[in-house]
Image (cartoon, coloured by chain):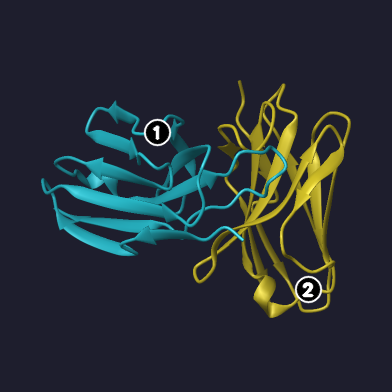
Chain colours: A cyan, B yellow
Amino acid sequence: GQQVMQIPQYQHVQEGEDFTTYCNSSTTLSNIQWYKQRPGGHPVFLIQLVKSGEVKKQKRLTFQFGEAKKNSSLHITATQTTDVGTYFCAPKTGTSYDKVIFGPGTSLSVIP
Amino acid sequence: KAGVTQTPRYLIKTRGQQVTLSCSPISGHRSVSWYQQTPGQGLQFLFEYFSETQRNKGNFPGRFSGRQFSNSRSEMNVSTLELGDSALYLCASSPRDSHNEQFFGPGTRLTVL
């Protein structure tokens, strides 16, 4: 079955530093979604990437889909305390009837 | 539009009991998915319902079941509770299917003693 890895598992950064999390799949993807979950909260959809090599930006967040459509990254520039939370990727293999799989998540702590 | 609502928000049960959790999706959303979230296992897919039909099921024992009503509201049931069932149960709705953007509810925190 499909294997999904996210690295790192945990990341502690000083406020203002950059942060990157990577999501790697064992199979080629049709698209990938990213979600953020604040401590004590629920996952919130951030973005969906569909095209090979696609790059999308949301203010300080940059999302990239790999050329081979087997990996993705989320980069945060100049982290703020509001960025604290766990970032999950949800890679999709293509058919609506496939089970939805979430990556294990990367937990980000920001030290003020 | 109102968001996804889940009831109850917190629940304490003892081993062997059964529990029913409820989820009301965003109006117009036909897909409802359920997830179990634990610190050690992350977000685990339980099942997805679409137009009252179970479209997919995760790798959970038969003690976990669900259903969806004609108004898209969904319930999940866990019978013969075990300590390991303690978790946050999240419901998510989507306009078409779970492979599109999902909107999560606040979850039900279940504690099994």
For label 2, the SS is loop
Residue annotated with mark 1: A52
Location of residue A104 with respect to B4 vertically, above or below: below
What label sits on residue B93 in the rendered view?
Answer: none
C-alpha distance separating marks 1 and 2:
44 Å
Please determine whether, in this image, residue A38 is positioned above or below residue B32: below
Q: Residues within 10 Å of mark 1 (few under 14, many from 20)?
A: some
Pick the residue in front: B92 or B13. Answer: B92
Relative to residue B66, is residue B102 depicted above or below?
Answer: above
Residue in view at x 72 percent, y 64 percent: B59
Q: Is the residue under label 2 in contact with that under label 1 (CB below 8 Å)?
A: no
Secondary structure of residue under mark 1: loop
Residue B86 rendering spot, x and y as whole percentages: 64, 70
Residue B73 found in image quarter:
top right
* Above or below, comparing residue B17 to residue B27 in the picture: below
Q: Chain of mark 1?
A: A
Foreground of the two, A5 or A109: A5
Quadrant of the drawing holding the N terminus of chain A: bottom right
Left of A83 or right of it: where is B84? right
Of all chains, the one bearing label 2 is B
Left or right? Give the position of B42 relative to B94. Answer: left
Q: What residue appears at the point 21 percent right and 50 percent down from the top-left corner?
A: A19
User: In the rendering, which numbered label is found on residue B81?
Assistant: 2
Amino acid type, residue under disc 2 in the picture: Leu
Q: Residue at coordinates 21% horizontally, 61% vertically from top-left?
A: A12
Task: Residue B78: give x, y in percent of width and height.
Answer: 80, 64
Q: Residues within 10 Å of mark 2 (few under 14, many from 20)?
A: many
> Are labels 1 and 2 on one chain?
no
Using residue A63 as the reference point, say whether residue B31 is left or right of it.
right
Can the viewer see residue A30 in this picture?
A: yes
The quadrant holding residue B19 is bottom right
